[in-house]
Amino acid sequence: MRLFDPIGASLAATLCALCLAAGAHAEAADEEPARGIDVSHYQGRIRWDLMPAGSLHFAFIKATGGTHRVDPEFDNNWHGAREVGITRGAYHFFYAGDDPIAQAEHFARTVISLRPDDLPPVIDVEITDGATPEALVDGVLAWLRTVENRLGRRPIVYTYHAFANQYLVDPRLSGYPLWIAAYDVRQPVLPAAWDDRGWHFWQHTHNGSFSGVNTPVDLNVFNGSLGQLQQFIRDYAGGACPPESPSCPP
């Protein structure tokens, strides 16, 4: 099923459920949440030019992993998304067994710079490489701080509930926006570290489909409308989110 087919009968029901889950940031009950995908070389060569206009608001794109891996499709996806007007963001897959500063520098060298309308950078944390929770958190925080210093944006943390509740319990992590993976639920359950902060992005399936992508693809929503997504980007463009902004965590 094409979950976000713009003329499909399933779209209204799907968006209705997601609007309810994203209601904390929505300005009106009938306002749709901003929709997105996240991609890597696992999706093969994506035809960004085939995506229906207005059907996709943002895309997270894998850039790097570890200290030297670069996703083979990063350049195509990074430039292709922008060429068709899709808001883009870059993410890094974190290996706790590799030096976190070297990983952050590798990511920053690959992305080079972010435009004012790009999403904040992302660290994908879902494996431990045998590290203790304390060592994992220390490494993640070192990556976050280094990337924020190099690229001028406070990064986003991507993870999932069970992993985060076991390994990412340090309250210092709650100062970073959360992108949560949670499938087959009406709304995600927050990890303890973010319990009072809320989520900004939700990856709600790993088995979606979209024009221009020939394989299953992850589908996401932002916790708010397209206008609120744009405000979120503006708030984080200078690094730490201004505490008075409505899109910031409390």
Image (tube, grey):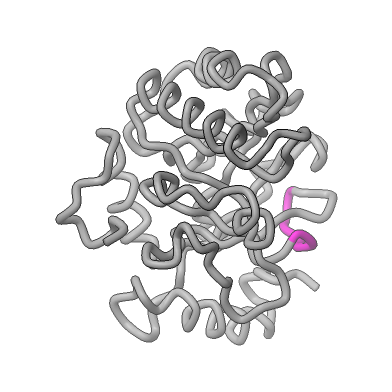
The answer to whether residue 65 is above or below residue 189 is above
- Identify the image quadrant of the N terminus: bottom right
Spot occupied by residue 182 in the image (x, y as percentages of width and height): 66, 66
Spot occupied by residue 90 in the image (x, y as percentages of width and height): 55, 34
Residue beneath the point at 57% across and 56% down: 36
- Identify the image quadrant of the C terminus: bottom left
Residue beneath the point at 61% across and 81% down: 186
**Stretch of the chain drawn in magenta:** 206-212
Seen from this angle, which residue lies furthest left?
Answer: 244
Between residue 132 and residue 94, name the one nearer to us: 132
Residue beneath the point at 70% across and 29% down: 95
Between residue 92 and residue 221, name the one nearer to us: 92
Spot occupied by residue 47 in the image (x, y as percentages of width and height): 72, 41
The answer to whether residue 69 is above or below residue 223 is above
| Residue 26 placement: quadrant | bottom left
| Residue 145 placement: quadrant | top left
Instruction: Answer whether residue 83 is visible to the viewer in this image.
Output: no
Q: How many marks?
A: 0
Residue beneath the point at 58% across and 30% down: 78
Spot occupied by residue 44 in the image (x, y as percentages of width and height): 82, 37
The answer to whether residue 142 is above or below residue 160 is above
Does the stretch in magenta take in 228?
Answer: no
Instruction: Answer whether residue 104 is visible to the viewer in this image.
Output: yes
Q: Is 3 placed left or right of 156 in the picture?
A: right
Magenta portion: prevailing SS class: strand
